[in-house]
Structures are given as C-alpha cells and as structure tokens.
Image: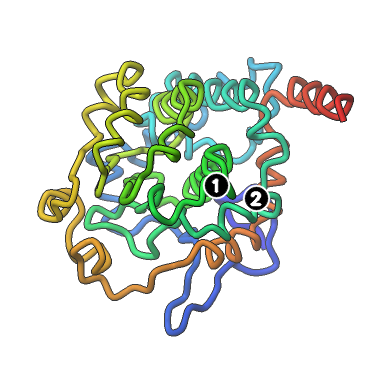
Amino acid sequence: MRVPTMLSELDELPSIQLGDYTLRFELEDLTQFGKDVAINELRETPEVKAHAVEELRALLKGQDELVLPLDNDDWLVRFLRPCKFYPKSALELIQRYYHFKVKHWDMYLDLSPSREVNIFKQNILTVFPNRDQLGRRILLLELGKPWRHKEVTLDEVFKGCVLFVEAAMLEPETQVNGAVVIFDMDGLTMQQAWQFTPPFAKRIVDWLQDAVPLRIKGIHIINQPKIFNVVFALFKPILRDKLRNRIVFHGTDRESLHKHISKGCLPPCYGGNVDAPRVKGEEWYELLLKCDGEYTAINKYGYIKQMDELRIKKNKKK
C-alpha cells in the first residue's frame, strides 16, 4: 500500500486500539478547516501549489550532493508549506534540514523507533491523541518528577522528539496547522538542571529555529520551579525574536495556559476536560514501530555521501 505522504510502502495503515479509541497517524487529505488555514496563512491554492512544486523540483535538481525523492510531490509539499510556498525558502530549509543531520550525525545516524525504545519506556515524552482548538498537534515533555535522568539522557529525549516531528511531517493537517509543545517542569531538581549544557541548548535552538520543517506555533512552560531560570539562561541568549515570542511561561496558572490551549483540548491534570485517553510513551512506541520502515526510507535521503563517511568513521572506532 502506497500512502502519498510516505516514502515507504505499508501492508496496512498503522494504528493501535486503546479501549474505544483508535490511535493513528492522520494521513488523509486536509479537512475543510485545514484547507481554510492553508489558503489564508500559507497562500496554498492549486495554482500556487503546482507552480511551487515544479519550481522547487527544478531548484533541487541543481543540488548534486543531495539525494532526494524529487518525483514525490507530497514530499516537496511538506517543505513548501512551512515556507508559505516560496520555493527558494523551501530550498534553503531543505539544505538546513540535511546539513543539521550531518552536523549532529551522532543523533541521526540510522535513527529509527526500533533503536530508541528507552525514551518511550520512560513515559516522559508523548503526543496528545487530540489536536488543540486550532488543529495543532500537542507534544508534551515532562522533565521534572517523572524524569529519571540517570536512566534516560537528554540526547535520548532529543531523538524521541525528532522521531515525533518526522511522524508529524507526514500528516497534511499538521503540516498546515503546526504543533505546540508543553514542557511540564514540575519537580525539576538541581541535579536534573545540571544535565542541560550549552552545547545541548544550542542544538535544540538551532533545530527549532532553522532545521524543523514544521510550524512550531507555541512553546508553553508550566509548573516550573525557580531552578528552571538557571536552565532557561542557557537558551535565552541564542533565541531569535520569532521563537522567543512564542515561548510562554505559565507556572501553575491554568487560566494563562487556557488562553493558548483551550480547556476542551487538555486533560484534567492541566485544568482541562478532554475525554481522550492519555497515551503512554510505550503506546506511541508501538505505533511508531509500525512505521519503522518509513524511518529507514527517510534515512536514505540527504547528504548521503557525508553520512556514509561518518558511519565508516564510527565503525572504525569500534
């Protein structure tokens, strides 16, 4: 079975059953809501889309070092949407996306769900099964009390986030509406705060600002103790205005959070009343594992010669 937005073939669409709820990736065409957002915010009309796809394909044909699925229109569209269908901007995003993978090859080499089970077993990283009131995916990271920092590193957390973002990039509705991130820092300790380093902070900020082909519409910090100020001090100097303005600190003020994400989209622990089940990390892992072949396909593209050289270098060190 060939799904247009995916690079691999599937025997069946990936999904898992959680009681009466079916957890799945939303790979179908845009809803009417998504179509309206695409037109109003991204300039997406059939004419603009068709012209931009052909122009971007032509631009990419001149990138000899890049291995790309140029015959896949849906793959091109996933980079055009966050760039509002300006082909030159999409070209630069693709270059940054793959350059980042080379620069941080130790995070990306052969990255797939089957190789990263630990982060999901820890159950500190999950995506809500429902979207918010603006159709955006909601990613939750709990880096306080639930985080056993001696058992799972921040590098593993980063790789888990990358796996989720790559999955989100497959969904047309998420390509258009984007995503929001909630960092629940309740119970953050000094020992945990020490795990954050300047190189890690720079990698995260560079990733979010330059190398994520997804519209990150908001980052919400909740339940943060005073020690979090020490952590944020690592990130603040390297944030550009666009991302800095999308970071909101709420503490324990649920009404403040609800101004951005409505109560009907949040679980009771965050003052909401959503009736969708909380999806555990291992349940997301089960779903992602069904798409393991897609991540293998994703890894076949980019600056492959450089990545292969780095793989050889890594193997020689063993």
**Image quadrant containing the C terminus:** top right
Q: What residue is drawn where x is 69% and y is 57%?
A: 9
Quick one: 253 or 163, which is closer to the camera?
A: 253
> What residue is disc 1 on?
160
Q: Answer above or below: position of 84 versus 282.
A: above
Q: How packed is label 2: few (under 14 Cα within 10 Å), some, or many (20 or more)?
A: some
Q: How packed is label 1: few (under 14 Cα within 10 Å), some, or many (20 or more)?
A: many
Toward which corner of the image does residue 243 lie, by quadrant?
top left
For the residues labelled 1 and 2, say whether their Cβ atoms are less than 8 Å apart.
Answer: yes
Q: Is residue 268 visible?
A: yes
As drawn, the label of residue 40 is: none
Please name the amino acid that badge 2 sits on: Glu
Q: Which is more N-terminal, label 2 or label 1?
A: 2
> What residue is disc 2 on?
116
Q: Which type of secondary structure does the marked residue at label 2 adopt?
A: loop
Query: Residue 67, how many percent across, how many down?
Result: 70, 27
Q: What residue is drawn where x is 38% and y is 43%?
A: 189
**Image quadrant containing the N terminus:** bottom right
Quick one: 58 or 157, which is closer to the camera?
A: 157
Q: Which type of secondary structure does the marked residue at label 1 adopt?
A: helix
Q: Is residue 182 visible?
A: no
Q: What residue is drawn where x is 54% and y is 57%?
A: 122
